[in-house]
Image (spheres, coloured by chain):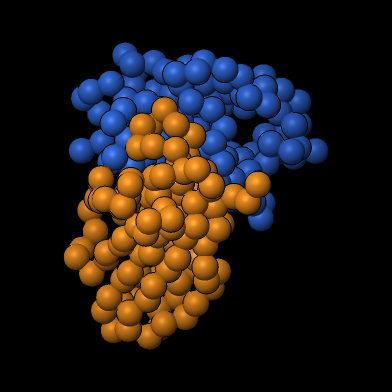
Chain colours: A orange, B blue
């Protein structure tokens, strides 16, 4: 059984550009969450989607947006990239939004903004 | 706002010695606490959660609401325990995601 898959694994962007990161949850999981992990820090919650609707949002600017598709895969979009957006972006999936469900993480997408 | 504090960035112990990774949290309600682990070149994965009160790989953690702590313990460390450990707090409803600490890098010396 495939785990949470993310693409691309690594990418380099220039300041001001836009980036799209993609995530496929574990089969049967309807909830997808996104986290940003800056070097030396723990993951920081960005969004949670469930049944294609945003159910939770962390303290991130409006440059960050996401969506979930009918097949429960998800995209994270970041506009007007800043140097400080350089980080590992983690996608996680779970059966529902209930925190008692185990959350499974992908390997992440490394974003470098230059 | 909720916060999770892991005071040690790095903890080095010898094989066979006891291990305790500290985690303190601040939240006025009833939190759900978790420990996540990331082994070298592997993805972040759940180690244990306080509601299940189970022991995983010899690790246990007890939620102490009076001291707002959820320390992770193991009586006898093994070399394969070397990893990055993150304490995380959930708010029950789940939609607000998890709040993670900064992590503790545990190194088990032979």
Residue A97 in sight here: yes
x, y percent for residue B3: 30, 37
Q: Quadrant of residue A107?
A: bottom right
Please state which of residues B16 and B33 is positioned toward the viewer in this rendering: B33
Residue A108 in sight here: no
Could you tell me which residue is drawn at 45 percent across and 72 percent down? A111
Please state which of residues A75 and B27 is positioned toward the viewer in this rendering: A75
Could you tell me which residue is drawn at 59 percent across and 50 percent down? A3
Q: Is residue A1 left or right of residue B10?
A: right
On screen, residue A109 above or below B13: below
The tally of labels here is 0
On screen, residue A42 above or below B71: below
On screen, residue B50 above or below B84: above
Could you tell me which residue is drawn at 31 percent across and 71 percent down? A78
x, y percent for residue B31: 32, 25
Q: Is residue B39 left or right of residue A31?
A: right
Q: Is residue A29 left or right of residue A82?
A: right
Q: Quadrant of residue B48?
A: top right
x, y percent for residue B10: 55, 44
Could you tell me which residue is drawn at 23 percent across and 69 percent down? A63
x, y percent for residue A93: 46, 46
Residue furthest out toward the front:
A70
Q: Quadrant of residue B11?
A: top right
Residue furthest out toward the right:
B110
> For the C terminus of chain A, which image quadrant?
bottom left
């Amino acid at each position: 059984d495939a785990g949470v898959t993310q693409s691309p694994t690594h990418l380099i962007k220039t300041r001001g550009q836009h980036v799209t990161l993609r995530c496929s949850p574990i089969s049967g999981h309807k909830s997808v969450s996104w986290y940003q992990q800056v070097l030396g820090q723990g993951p920081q919650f960005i969004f949670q989607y469930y049944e294609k609707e945003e159910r939770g949002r962390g303290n991130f600017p409006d440059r960050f947006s996401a969506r979930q598709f009918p097949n429960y895969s998800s995209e994270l979009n970041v506009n007007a990239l800043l140097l400080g957006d350089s980080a590992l972006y983690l996608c996680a999936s779970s059966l529902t939004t209930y925190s008692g469900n185990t959350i499974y993480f992908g390997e992440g997408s490394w974003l470098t903004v230059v | 706002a909720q916060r999770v504090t892991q005071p040690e960035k790095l903890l080095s112990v010898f094989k066979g010695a006891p291990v305790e990774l500290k985690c303190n949290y601040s939240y006025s309600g009833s939190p759900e606490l978790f420990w996540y682990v990331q082994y070298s070149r592997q993805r972040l994965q759940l180690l244990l959660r306080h509601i299940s009160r189970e022991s995983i790989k010899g690790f246990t953690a007890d939620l102490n609401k009076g001291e707002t702590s959820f320390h992770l313990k193991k009586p006898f460390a093994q070399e394969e325990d070397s990893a990055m450990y993150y304490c995380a707090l959930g708010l029950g409803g789940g939609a607000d995601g998890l709040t993670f600490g900064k992590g503790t890098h545990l190194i088990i010396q032979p």
